[in-house]
Amino acid sequence: MAKDKSAKTSAKTSAKTSAVVDSIGSLGDYLREQRLAAQLSLRQLADQVGVSNPYLSQIERGLRKPSAEVLQQLARALRVSAEQLYVRAGIVHPDPGQAGSVELAILADTGLTERQKHSLLDVYASFLALNDRPPGPDQPPAQ
């Protein structure tokens, strides 16, 4: 029975890891397409963004996940929407019915560190997940 539980946990972890790699991979592919469309070399874009050439190469190949600030710089240099890059990176989840995004406001706040931004995003996501869950027998419905 312990083996069954560890196999299920391993499968869940593997699925989560695969989803992260897929989202980063699609981000890297998208960035490469945009860079080529802008007729920029990897080195030129890295210089404009203020990151190293190897680091940008790793982002494009899906080996690294850039911070929100690096994504903002990439968006500016490639003249694309920062929100689109956040969605592709898995930082922000698209919500077509919502005009202003709390997640985007957090990411745009220059008074917060990267760690603080990610902590706030995690807390916000956990509140949303709690509100989406059906109430248990002992719990009142979310207000």
Image (cartoon, rainbow, N blue to C red):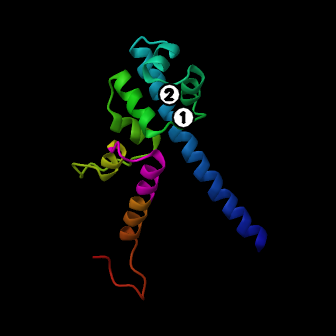
Quarter of the rendering occupied by the C terminus: bottom left
| Numbered circle sitting on residue 29 | 2
Q: Residue at x 45, y 28 (%)?
A: 30
Q: Residue at x 57, y 23 (%)?
A: 57
Q: Residue at x 47, y 13 (%)?
A: 44
Residue 76: give x, y in percent of width and height. 34, 26
| Quarter of the rendering containing residue 37 | top left
Q: Secondary structure at mark 1?
A: helix
Residue 133: give x, y in percent of width and height. 40, 71
Mark-to-mark CA distance, 1 and 2: 6 Å
Extent of the magenta region:
109-122
User: Is residue 5 magenta-colored?
Assistant: no
Q: Nearer the viewer, residue 49 or 19?
A: 49
Residue 96 appears left or right of 88: left
- Is 109 above or below relative to 4? above
* Secondary structure mainly formed by the magenta segment: helix
Q: Secondary structure at mark 2?
A: helix
Discs 1, 2 touching: Cβ within 8 Å: yes
Q: Amino acid at mark 2?
A: Asp
Q: Amino acid at mark 1?
A: Gly
Residue 123 appears left or right of 101: right
Residue 15: give x, y in percent of width and height. 60, 52
Q: Residue at x 40, y 42 (%)?
A: 87
| Quarter of the rendering containing residue 10 | bottom right
Residue at which label 1 appears: 25
